[in-house]
Image (spheres, grey):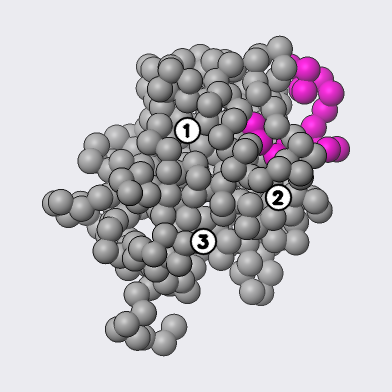
Amino acid sequence: MTQDPRWTSADSLLRPELRAGRLSAALIGISTFQSSLTPRSGTSTPAAIRTALERFATFSWQDEVDLAELVDVVDYGDVHEPDAADGKIHVREHMARIDAACGLLIALGGDNSMTFPAMSALAGDALGRWGLITLDAHLDLREGESNGSPVRQLLEAGLDGNHVAQLGLADFSNSASYALEARKAGITIVPRFEMRNQPIDVAVARALEVAGEGDRPIYVDIDFDVADRASVPACPAAAPGGLSADDVRRAARLLARDPRVRAIDLTEIDVERDTDDQRTVRLAALVVLEVLAGFVGRAR
């Protein structure tokens, strides 16, 4: 990229440590891939997203703010071998390094299997008092341990299904059996067809009400296969007809603006499947910036 002292690149937001007196978010990479239901490469998506931030600036027209003046992103690096037999321990130990002064965690996957160890590590023994919001084409209630099972694993570990909201569930991407199981667990489901004729703001507000009832802390999982496949070719399970890239970005900003949201993860991008123009990875970098804009907006 051409260097211009008057054009602040978004990768400048990443910092190795906290600075006193600054609003701070934390960034961590959890590059899981080995248990994926769809074989994929081990190329690091977190590294690709960090690199893609260089292509974008820190100024937001929507809010008339420059993120560079308002927030630091403390980069805690990537978890070592999160797919190993003791990978969950690696995730927990790595996340224990995050300073409590960081008001929001942004976790970059990896496939969706990283959501279970990340949320479990963050919530600890209080998992039953947290809420979960997913933007996902799938319920993620499959048996076993894979990128198709994080919601099941969280429920089995003590998460209350009455405080789980799942947005963007796609037709012909889930089974009747798992749909019935989700309803029995008390999960609030907002399928894709219900979202077509209403602003994304409506679905997000409903999800926040469910997941955050009683002022619960909320974990948000953004699985990029919720988006239309034309926007996210690097997502193995994405299908035509998903959310627009703009809706995904809008949802991320709205969710991050709510102070009950403690963490947002970005999952299901295989860098090796992306197009030459890197449209999936670039969308992920923009979602990171939307999250930061929402986070900054909490104080405005």
Residue hosting label 2: 243
239 shown above or below 86: below
Q: Secondary structure at mark 3?
A: helix
| Mark 3 Cα-neighbour bin, 10 Å: few <14, some 14–19, many ≥20 | many
Task: Please identify the quarter of the rendering in which residue 122 is found.
Answer: top left
Residue type for callout 3 = Leu
Q: How many marks?
A: 3
The reply to whether the magenta stretch includes residue 135 is no
At horizontal 49% and vertical 49% (from top left) the residue drawn is: 253
Residue 282 x/y as whole percent = 56, 65
- Left-right relation of 204 to 292: right
At horizontal 40% and vertical 22% (from top left) the residue drawn is: 215
Residue hosting label 3: 286
Name, please, the residue furthest toward the left.
20
Q: Are marks 2 and 3 in contact (CB under 8 Å)?
A: no
The reply to whether the magenta stretch includes residue 167 is yes
Closer to the chain start, of discs 2 and 1, is 1
Q: From the image, state whether disc 2 or disc 1 is nearer to you.
A: 2
